[in-house]
Image: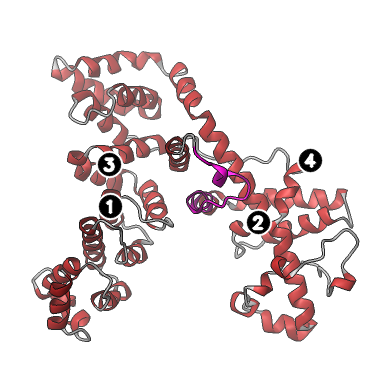
Amino acid sequence: MAKQGTSQAQTPPGWPVLGPEDRMSACVDYRTVLGNYDELVAAEGEEQVRESLDYLFYFLDHSYALLDEPEFRDLRWSLEPHDYLVYELYEYIDAHQGTDLEGIGPLLPDPRVLHMVSDGLDRYTTPALRRDIAGRAQDLIQRLPGTVQAAMAQAVQFAAEDPSISPLLVGLLVQSFRRTLLDAVLDLPELIDREWEARDRSLDRWREAIYSATPDHLARDAVAALQAAGSAALPQVQRIYYDTSLNCGDQPFGEALEVAAAIPSALSFWLLRQTLVDCPLMRDWVAEQMAAQMPAFACAYFNYLLTAPEPPDADLAVAGLGVIVAAHCPDAPALAVDALHYHVDDAEATERVQVAAWEAVLALGDPEAILELREYLADEQASARARDLLVEALQSGRGREVGAQVLQSVKVGAVGSRSSAAG
């Protein structure tokens, strides 16, 4: 990127004068984030490098202003309309009806909403989108040379062409994705209606057969027929699912889920996720289907869930830890280790999640993750009962092969006595 200026006195006309609160260098040591920082300093001097970087990140942060420019006004993300983030934000807004929702506004002060946007940026910022952004920025630079908008566009172009720069640092990307996500949330009820009206009506008879559930063989034929129809059957599945009002023991509800599980899609995954929450007796089956039929959807969703700024629902967390192991998710070891530190006011929920976390660590067999169990056993803040159960597992057949490795630096008797006293 071209030099952004070397001092306040040399700031180009129209550029803002940065105060201490505007400068990333006031809170970040650039040497820790840029591997070639010392080389840049040797070539240009530290003051100039710091000034250039401060303006780079300031312009990136404020680049949402470019969304009003013609080059970016029609920028849209290829967001899957049934992406789990759409439902997550829909439920979040619904839960806060009548309360302050400024957290979903442009400043995104709400940590949970920011987490949603961050997750979406990670998954949807594709190489093709980066090229598109860079091209739009170049058009703006050519249209408004020498202006602050051009400088801002230059920063955006630089970030778009450098995959090492997080899209979360680019205000233009953050705000445009937020708008796209919010638009999808607001459109969701009408989307469901449109999909129903556009359905393949030749499949209606199979939906009716499932509703009637008699004779049983017709219902089984209907399940097979809808599964064979693939994505064309999803409006039918969605209608059955919501018509049965989450009656977990209802035969049509279960058969709709069978069809959904056989058709990997964002919508099918969300229906399974809802069932995971609302139907405890079906959780084992649902978790198996997620891992076996939709591992990519499952890995993405449980990565999002288990890295949220607030502890997730304990039942979802326990189920998710089992799914990421079964689905062989690439981030499973790190997620399991992080879940060792799960803590909520409910001691029983805390224990269940921590037990599921160390069970996941042992099942994965990742050497570095297993070594983290030493720190866990020494953690006085961990669930006493969960630690005791881990010690028992490490001394038993199922964990004996790694038990010595974990326990060699931990006094088992001390762990047990501390746990008993805490309990």
SS type, badge 3: helix
**Residue 255 in the image: above or below residue 133:** above
**Marks 4,3: beta carbons within 8 A:** no
Image disc number at residue 314: 1
The stretch in magenta equals: 99-120
- Seen from the viewer's position, the closer of residues 245 and 297 is 245
Measured as percent of width and height from the top left, residue 192 is found at 45, 25
Query: Nearer the N terminus, badge 1 or badge 3?
Result: 3
In the displayed structure image, the side of residue 227 where residue 175 appears, left or right = right
Q: In the rendered structure, which disc, 3 or 2, sits on the residue that comes first in sequence?
A: 2
Which label belongs to residue 385?
A: none
The amino acid beneath tag 1 is Ala
| Residue 95 sits above or below residue 306 on the image | above
Q: Which mark is residue 276?
A: 3
**Label 4, label 3: how far apart the Cα atoms are:** 45 Å
**Residue count near mark 1 (Cα–Cα under 10 Å), binned few <14, some 14–19, many ≥20:** many
